[in-house]
Image (cartoon, rainbow, N blue to C red):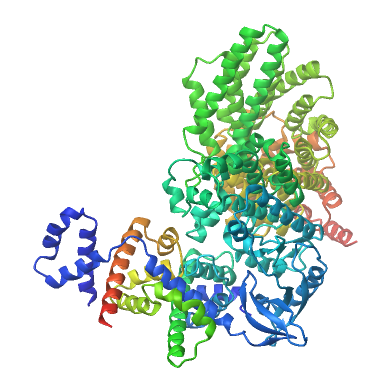
Amino acid sequence: MTRPSSVTQLLSDWRSGQPDALERLTPLVYDELRRLADRFMKRERPGHTLQATAIVHEAYERLISVEVPWVDRQHFFSIAARLMRRILVDHAKQRAANKRSGKVTVFELQEHDAEIADIGFSIVEIDQALSQLAAVDRRLADIVEVHYFAGLSVEETAATLEISVSTLNRELRTAKAWLTKTIRAAMHDT
Amino acid sequence: MTPERWALIRDAFHRVVESAPAERESLLKSVCGDDAELRREVEAMLASDVDGDRQLREAIGGAVAHVVEHQRSSLIGSQLGTYRVTGVLGHGGMGTVYLAERVDRQFQQRVAIKLVEQMAVHPQLRTRLRAERQILANLEHPYIARLIDGGESEAGIPYLVIEHIDGMPIDEYCRTHKLGIRARLELFEKVCAAVDHAHRNLIVHRDLKPANILVTADGTPKLLDFGIAKLLAPEPAGYTLAVTRMQDRLLTPEHAAPEQVLGRSITIATDVYALGVLLYQLLCDRSPYALHSSTMQGLERAICSEDPPRPSSLFRSGRPRTLLEAGGFDPQVAARERGISVDRLRRALAGDLDEIVLKAMRKEPEARYATAALLAADVRRHLDGEIVTARQGSGRYRAYKFIRRHAAAVTIASVILAALIGFAALMWTQQQQLKAQRDLAARERDRATQVSSFMVDIFSSADPFNAQGRDITASELLDRGAARIRSNLNQQPEVRAQMLDSIGYAYQRQGNQQKAIPLLEESLQIRRQTATGPNPLLVTSLLNLADALRKAGNAASAEGYYRQALAMSRDLFGENDRRVADVMVGLGRLLYPNPAHLGEAEQLLENALAIYKAKLGPEGSDVAETLSDLGNLMLWKDDLASAEQYHRQALRIYQETVPRTHPDYAQTLGSLGYELVRRGNLAEAEKVLNEALELKRQVFGASSPQLSAVLQSLADIHDQRGELNQAMALETEALTISRRSAGERVVETAVFLDSLARLQAKAGMREEARRNVLAALSIYGEKLPADHPYIASSDQLLGEIHLAAGEAREAIAPLRRALDICVRTYGVTSWRTARSQSALGEALAATDNPGEAEPLLLESYRTLRAQLGNDDDLTQLARKRVLKFLSAHGRAAEADRLLASDSR
C-alpha cells in the first residue's frame, strides 16, 4: 500500500534537487492512477474527461497529505497529467494490437466500437501531435497536458502553471488550433 | 519545424486570430509577407480554430472509458464462490457490479455480485466489512434489494451477492411510463419508506440516485447498493475516515450533498438531501445542478454555494432561456413528453413542491427535514391538500442562511441588525401604549423605513453576496455605516441615536474603542435630551459607552457610567432581570483587575451568572460568557486551577452552541491558552493558542487588538522554552497591533511595553528594556491610580534592570514603590511582596545599608521558600542574594547553616 506521506516526501525531495526522487515518484503515481481508473465508475455522460479529472483529483487526495507547498501541488498535477496521458495511450495501443491479433472480447466490441466511430480524433493521434508540439514548445504542450489530461479547469490550470487566465485562454486557443490542424493533416495523409 | 519557426507561426497566429474577419486578409499579408509557407501554416490553423474542444475531450474521455472497461470485462466467465459471472451490470462507487448465476443448483438463480475493489487497497477494512455485511443481511424491507451472501475472490477482493432486480432506474421508469405528478410522488413516498427503514437500523445509504433505485415491472421500487452504507456508529480507527472521505468523493457528484463534497460528517440528513435531489429529478426530469456539471469543480462549488433553481422556475412559458438551453434542457419538450402543458406543470410545482424539494436540499444538514419519514409526510400532506411544513418559516431560513454565508461580517452586522430589530419592536410597544395610533403609526413606518433603508444602503453598496470575490469585512461594513450617519443629519433623533449606538456597539465588540466612544457618547447625549426619566434605551447607551470606555482603559469614567446604568436598570427591571445582569457583568469586569474590588467583582459576576442560568438555561451564551469572566477573575486571584475550570466550562457551552468563528469562543480559547501557559502545560497551550490566533485573525482581521493577548501568550511559551528571539518577535507584533488599534498612550499598550521590556531584560538588552519599561510606567502614571498593581510590576522590573546594570542606587526608588504597593495590595506574606523585598534588600546591601538590607533579604527568602518552594527561580535568586550578603559580611558560618536548613 502506498503511504501518502512518501509521495509528499518524494515531491519535496525532487523539488530540493534529488533527481532520483522523480524516478521513484513516477511509478507510485502511475499505479495509483491506473488503479483508480480501473475501479472508476462509468459516468453518465460517457467519454467525458470528467473521468480523467476525477481520477487525477482522486489520486491527488489519496497520495498527497493535506499541507503541501503550492509548488509541490504544481508538480503533482504536471506528473499526473503526463502519466495519465501515458496510461491512456499505452492502453489504446495495446487494444489496437489485440484487435489486430483478434484478441478482443465480445463485450468490448459490442459496447464500444460504435462509440469510437463517432469520435473524430484518436488518443494516439493526439499523443503524437502533442509530442510534436512539445518538441518546439514545451510549455504549450504542458498547458494542454495539465488542462486536458489532468482535467484541471481553466482557472486551476492557470493557477497551477502560474499564468493569467487570459494568457492561458490564448495559449489554449493556439494549441487547439495547431493540434486540430496537425491531426487533420495526419488523417488525410493516411 | 524548429522552435524559432514555431515562434514565428505562433505570433502570426495570435495577431491574426484576434482581429476581425474582415481585416484578416490584409493582416495576413503584412504579417507573413512573402513567406508562403508561414501563410499556409497560419491559414490552416485559422481554419482549425473552432470553438470548443469536443474532439479533444471525447478522445480523452473515450480512452479513459476504455481503460476502465477493459479491466472489468476480464472477470466475465470466471467463478466467484458458487456463482459464475455472466456479465457486467454496472459500476458503483465502490466497485463493479456483475451479473452472475448459481452453478450448484438445478434451477437458475440470477444474482448481482458486487466486487468491493476498493477493499483490495485497504485490507484492514475487511473485518469491518464483514460486520457491516451482517447488518446489511438483516436489512429486510420490501423496497430494499436483499443481501444474499458474500465472500472473497481469489485475489482477496471481497464481494457481496445481492438479489438481482429486473427493473429500470426510477427516473427512466417515470419517463417511459409518462407518470403524472401524483404517481411520481407516490413512488417517491415508497422510496422514502425504504430509506427511513434503513435509517432506523442505523444505516445511511450515502449514494441514493436513480441508478440505485430500480422499479420492477409491477411498479415496486427496490433500493440497491447499500454497499457503501456505513453504520452510524463511531469510526473505529483513523484510517476509516480517510477511506470514507475517498468513497464519498467517488459518488456521482450530481447527487452528493454539500457535506459530502466538503468531506464533513455524513448523517441521515445526507440521505434526506439525496432524496431531495431525487424528488427534483422526478418532478422536473432534470437534475438540479445540470448547468454546472461541465467540470467537477464547478459542480462541487454549485452544490456547496448555490441554490438550485426552483423546480417550477424551470417551466416558464415562452422561449427557453439560453442558460437552460445550455443545460440541454428544453421545458417545452420535457412537458410535452409527459403529456402536460408547461403552464400546468409549472403551476403544479409552484408552491408546496418547490418548498418541499428546497427544504430537503438545504445546504445545512440541520435545516433539512430531520428524517426521510418527515419528508414523506410533507409529500403526503401535499397530496392530501393539507398545509406542508416546508412553507413555514422559509423567511427565517433565508435570514439564517444569509448569516451562515457571511459568518464573519455578519457576526458584527447581525449585532446591528438585532439591535435595530429590537429597537423597532421597542418603539412599536411604546407607541402602542401611547394610543395615538394613526399618526404615530405613520411616524413609525417612516422610522422603520429609515432604519431599513439605512441597512440596505450599507449592505448593498458593496456586494457581499458575490461569492467569487472577497467577502466584505466587518470593518468596512461599519466604516460605511458610520460615514453614512455622519453625512446624514436629517434622521429623527431616536433613529439617529439608535444607529449611533448600534454601530458604536459593533465597533466596541470589534475592539475598536477609539471609533466606538464618540459614536456612543453622541448616542447617549441624544437619548438624555429626549428621555424624560429612567428609560431602557438610556440603560443601553450607558452600558455600551461604559463597556467601550472600560476596554479603552478609562476605568474611572467607565465605573461612573456602569453605576448609573446599574441603578437605573434595577429601578426599571427589578433585581433579577437579564438587563441588570448585563450591567453587573460589565462592572464586574471593570472591577476585578483591581484587588481592592475583587471581592465585589466576584459577587457581581456570581449574581449575574445565577440570573442568566435562571433566565436562559445552563447553556445560554451569556452563561458561557460569564463563566469565562469568572475564569478571568480567578486569574487575578492567582487561582489558575479554578480559572482553567471556568474557561473549560465556558468552552464546552460554546462548542455546543455557536460556530467556531464566534468571537467569544476565540476569546475564551485565548484565556485558556494563557492559563495553560502559566500552569506549564506548554504543548496544549500552544495548540489552543494557535487555534485562537487563527480564529481571531478570521473574525477580527489581522491587525485587531484581539490578537495581541494571544500573541503575548505565545511569546510566553517561547520565553519559557528559552527561545527569546521568537518571544520578542511575537511580543513586538502584539505591541505594534496594540499601538495601532488601541492607541499609543493606553494601558493596554503599556502592558505590552512592559512585557517586551521583561523579555529584553532577560536577553540582556538593558537599554531597550529600560526605555520600554519607563514608557509603560509613564502611561500607567497617567491612566492608573498610583497604587495599581501594574505599576508595582513595572517598577519591580525597572529596579531589577538597574540592579542587573550595577546601578543599585537607581534601583532603590522604583523597588520601594513596588514594595509599598505590594504590601498594601497583596499583604506581607505574598510572593510578590517577597520578590520586591529581596530585590530591594540587594539594592540596599550594595549601597552600604546592610542594616535595612538584612531583614529584607532574610524575610523574603523565607517567604519565597514557603510560598513557591525551594526550586522556584525566585527562591533561588533570593537565596543567592542572602548567601552573597552573608559572605560579604564575613558570616560564612551562618551561610552554611542556611544551606544546611535548605536540605532538610
Q: In this rendering, is residue B43 above or below B568?
A: below
Q: Residue furthest bottom?
A: A101
List x then y, in percent, for residue B290.
52, 54
In percent of the image, x 34 and y 56: which residue is there? A166
Q: Is residue B704 visible?
A: no
Q: In this rendering, is residue B26 above or below B753?
A: below
Left or right, residue B764 beside residue A177 = right
In percent of the image, x 44 and y 45: which residue is there? B320
List x then y, in percent, for residue B523.
60, 19
Q: In this rendering, is residue A63 above or below B173?
A: below
Q: Is residue B488 visible?
A: yes
Q: Residue furthest top?
A: B436
Q: Nearer the viewer, residue B250 or B598?
A: B250
Total marks shown come to: 0
Left or right, residue B401 beside residue B901 = left
Q: Residue furthest right?
A: B904
List x then y, in percent, for residue B735.
57, 43
Q: Nearer the viewer, residue B754 or A183?
A: A183
- Quadrant in which the C terminus of chain A is drawn: bottom left
Q: Nearer the viewer, residue B455 or B511?
A: B455
